[in-house]
Amino acid sequence: MKIELENGKYTYIFNENTGVQEVLRYGEPWVEDLTGCNWSLAMAHEIQRLRKQEGYKEDFESECG
C-alpha cells in the first residue's frame, strides 16, 4: 500500500509481504522505525478506505515487493 499526502510531500509505504512500514518526506526516509506501530497502519487503512469511498482514481495497490 502506498499513500501520498500533501501533493507528494509525505509518502507512507506498507509492504504487505514483509510488514515493513516506511514514511518518506520529499522522497527521503523521514520516520526511522515504525516496527509494531499499529496506529500508523490503522491510519493508512482508514485513509485508503475513505479515498476509495470518495471515488479517488488513485491506484492503491503498490509494487512493494
Image (cartoon, grey):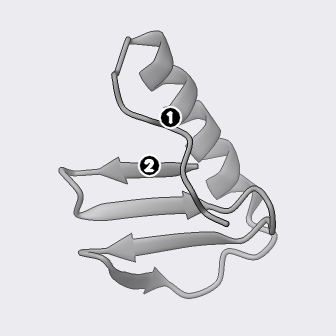
Query: Which image quadrant is residue 40 in?
Result: bottom right
Q: Amino acid at mark 2?
A: Ile
Report the side of 3 relative to 19 (left or right): left
The C terminus is located in which quarter? Answer: bottom right
Residue at (74% x, 65% y) in the render: 37
User: Earlier along the polypeptide chain: callout 2 or callout 1?
Assistant: 2
Q: Secondary structure at mark 2?
A: strand
Residue at the spot of label 2: 3
Circle 2: is it few (<14), some (14-19), or many (20+) Cα within 10 Å?
A: many
Image height check: is 6 above or below 45? Answer: below
* Most foreground residue, 33 or 22: 22
Residue 44 or 14: which is nearer the viewer?
A: 14
Q: Which residue is mark 1?
A: 47
Whole-angstrom CA distance, mark 2 to mark 1, is 8 Å
In the image, what residue type sits under mark 1? Answer: Ile
Expressed as whole percent of the image width and height from the top left, the position of residue 26 reads 24, 75
Vertical order, 49 against 32 (above or below): above
Residue 62 position, x and y percent, is 54, 50
Task: Give the percent coordinates (x, y) of residue 27.
Answer: 30, 76
Residue 2, given in percent of the width and then of the height, sits at 49, 52
Q: Nearer the viewer, mark 2 or mark 1?
A: 2
**10 sits left or right of 2 in the view:** left
